[in-house]
Image: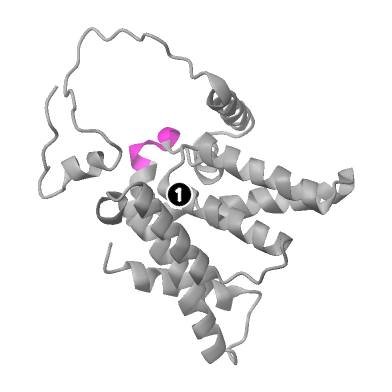
Amino acid sequence: LEAPQPIEGFAYDKYLAKDAIYSICAFPKDINVINGQVSGYRGWLYVVKNYFSQNINSSIAEPMASLLQGIILGDKKGMGEELTEVFQKTGLSHIVALSGFNISILVGMALAIGPYIYLSRRVLLIIISFLIVAFVIMTGASPSIVRAGCMGLVLLFAYEFRRLPHALNILLFIAVGMVLNNSKILLWDIGWQLSFLATFAMLKIVPELSFRLRRWPAFFGIRDILFMTFSATLITAPLL
């Protein structure tokens, strides 16, 4: 074992330290797997995730299957270096990064199905809350999906208790909470930084553009898409 070192200007040691990894073994030999199974609730969640992955692989051809797994489950392992590089060069890597989009799909499906099986509003809220927590854990609890999951939960409870949510306050509250839990992500987790900056752009810059340029024709929602893309790109450009 040896301590990780910076690589060509990249703070590899700090990058690993945010996940509490302080030692690496570059070329291990004679590895024996003691126990390859995850027990408890996490084990069941991983079984569900593998079930979805297997069904996607059996239903759709590659590379579309790997792309769909990346979009829905955040699993990019099957995409390969070539396809991953294409997404990086075209600036579309965020498509296969877990975010609020995934949480929105989950909540939307639950809200659509709930009334058909006669669930009360409170019972549906509890079920959606469990689904969000399960999805965050199942997909690896990356900073971007933890941020999205926490915001989704706070918004759900705000509406349930008839409180008018202030999205920027919620974003700041969750950011402070995550930094208090792990201060290293503030400086060394690029995914966490990009997630919060892009979300801030959605909440602050997009409404301002929409108001000032409200005379622009919508064109089937293309205007709003352009505003969101421009805002997120503008605010994350210095960090990128």
The spot of residue 183 in percent (x, y) is 30, 51
Of residue 68 and residue 212, the one placed in the foreground of this image is 212
Q: Which residue is drawn at 61% across and 45% down?
A: 132
Instruction: Please name the predominant secondary structure of the magenta segment in the image.
Output: helix
Q: Is residue 122 visible?
A: yes
The spot of residue 100 in percent (x, y) is 54, 56
Q: Residue at x 30, y 38 (%)?
A: 19
Q: Can residue 90 be seen in this view?
A: no
Q: Above or below — where is 159 with respect to 45?
A: below
Q: Which residue is drawn at 20% across and 33% down?
A: 22
Label 1: which residue? 97
Q: At label 1, which amino acid type do we have?
A: Ala
Residue 66 in magenta stretch: no
Of residue 222 and residue 189, the one placed in the foreground of this image is 189
Quadrant of the frame with the C terminus:
bottom left
The spot of residue 186 in percent (x, y) is 30, 55
Image side of residue 188 versus residue 205, left or right: left
Q: Above or below — where is 195 with respect to 84?
A: below
Image side of residue 159 versus residue 237, left or right: right
Q: In which quarter of the image is residue 235?
A: bottom left
Callout 1: helix, strand or loop?
loop
The spot of residue 77 in percent (x, y) is 41, 34
Residue 80 in magenta stretch: yes
Of residue 218 and residue 214, the one placed in the foreground of this image is 214
Image side of residue 115 versus residue 105, left or right: right
Q: Above or below — where is 167 with respect to 215?
A: above
Q: In which quarter of the image is residue 135?
A: top right
Q: How many tags in the picture? A: 1
Question: Which stretch did the figure color magenta?
Answer: 77-82
